[in-house]
Image: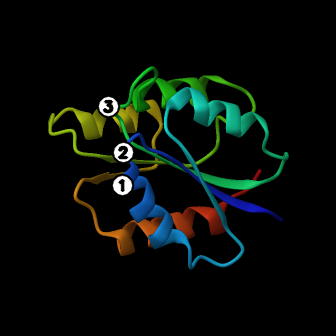
Amino acid sequence: MPRKVLIVEDTPYYASALEIALSSLPDVVVSHAPTGGAALEQLEALQPGTACVILTDLHMPLMDGFELIERLRSGDRHERLPVIVLSGDTDPETPGRIRRLGADAFFAKPYSPTEVRNKVEELLNAFAP
């Protein structure tokens, strides 16, 4: 079964660092979308049954991570995809808000690439379409 990680990040430095950290995961294709809208377009092209984890920033142009999570959770096709939020947001309400929206994990920037990689691997291994 195919496995995919979609990085939704508008800052090239963070996107590249994540790609490097995740490149050693076995049988995983890592792709990047700079906005929430671009992420939704890529997700529509996914084959049914593909194990996919989404890593998203919160503050991006056009569609932020909050709206992306809301759209994913309100749809029929991608509502169960695991979502990990990576953000420099310092609002103390943010972790609770993203949990209520249905995110599976939150890592504050700067984060440990190893911890993020371990969480991605855990979620990919637990995926059930």
Give the Cα separation between the discs numbered 3 and 2. 23 Å
Please provide percent x and percent y for residue 23. Answer: 56, 73
Q: Which residue is mark 2?
A: 11
Q: Which residue is more in the foreground, 125 or 41?
A: 41
Closer to the chain start, of discs 3 and 1, is 1
Crowdedness of circle 2 by 10 Å Cα count: few (<14), some, many (20+)?
few
Quadrant housing the N terminus: bottom right
Q: Is residue 27 left or right of residue 13?
A: right
Q: Distance of mark 3 from mark 1, alpha carbons?
A: 23 Å
Residue at the spot of label 1: 14
Taking 89 as reference, is 105 left or right?
Answer: right
Q: Residues within 10 Å of mark 3 (few under 14, many from 20)?
A: few
Identify the image quadrant of residue 80: top right
The amino acid marked with disc number 1 is: Tyr
Kindly state the secondary structure of the residue where label 2 is placed: loop
Label drawn at residue 97? 3
Q: In the rendered view, does 24 fall on the left or right side of 10?
A: right
Q: Residues within 10 Å of mark 1 (few under 14, many from 20)?
A: some
